[in-house]
Amino acid sequence: MPKGAPGLAWVFPAMGHQKCGKSSHSDPGVVQRVLCVDRLADGNRVRIGYYEWESVDDGLQFYKDQDLAAGDLGGFHRFTGASGDLLKNAALYEDALFSFTITVPPTAVLGPDDIAALASRPPGQLLGGPVG
């Protein structure tokens, strides 16, 4: 299973073209968090948080504490809702210690190219990735 900074970058290949800050430990259960920004095709700014967790349960609790709507789909725990005047969409791998959160203004239009550019690796591709 991927681990550490190389693992985070491998699980989330979009990080390679985004402007990202330094890794931090923001909340209980967080091994590392990296915050990035990018631009959508419509010109709106998107903020992305990439997380590595000590456990999937830590990630679940983090998102549940934000009162987001929750559901499971395609190997991910998914969360959606509002964060102040922004819209938030998050996905936590069901069987891996990683998640990402995308935050956009309500006027943003995520087209197919944006969605593809922000995509993480599918759950079935995580084994055999970079470690530590």
Image: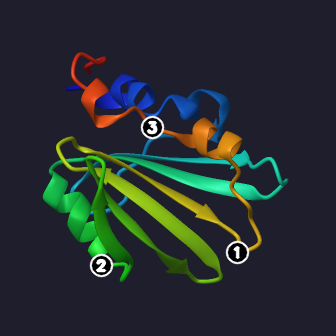
Q: Amino acid at mark 2?
A: Asp
Vertical placement of residue 89 versus 69, above or below: above
| Along the viewing direction, whichever of 79 and 52 lies nearer the viewer | 79
Tell me, for residue 14, which label it has, or none: none
Provide the secondary structure element on which disc 1 rests: loop
Which residue was labeled with disc 1? 106
Earlier sequence position, callout 1 versus callout 3: 1
- Asked whether residue 73 appears in the rendered view, the answer is yes
Q: Quadrant of the N terminus?
A: top left
Earlier sequence position, callout 3 versus callout 2: 2
- Asked whether residue 21 appears in the rendered view, the answer is no
Provide the secondary structure element on which disc 3 rests: loop
User: Alpha carbon of mark 1 to alpha carbon of mark 3: how far?
Assistant: 22 Å
User: Alpha carbon of mark 2 to alpha carbon of mark 1: how far?
Assistant: 22 Å
Residue displayed at 38% across by 55% down: 91
Residues at discs 1 and 3 in contact (Cβ within 8 Å) = no
Residue 109 placed where, x, y %? 74, 61
Q: Residues within 10 Å of mark 3 (few under 14, many from 20)?
A: many
Which residue was labeled with disc 3? 120
Provide the secondary structure element on which disc 2 rests: loop
Which residue was labeled with disc 2? 65
Q: Nearer the viewer, mark 2 or mark 1?
A: 1
Residues at discs 3 and 2 in contact (Cβ within 8 Å) = no
Q: Amino acid at mark 3?
A: Ser
User: Alpha carbon of mark 3 to alpha carbon of mark 2: how far?
Assistant: 23 Å
Q: Nearer the viewer, mark 3 or mark 2?
A: 3
Residue displayed at 45% across by 41% down: 23
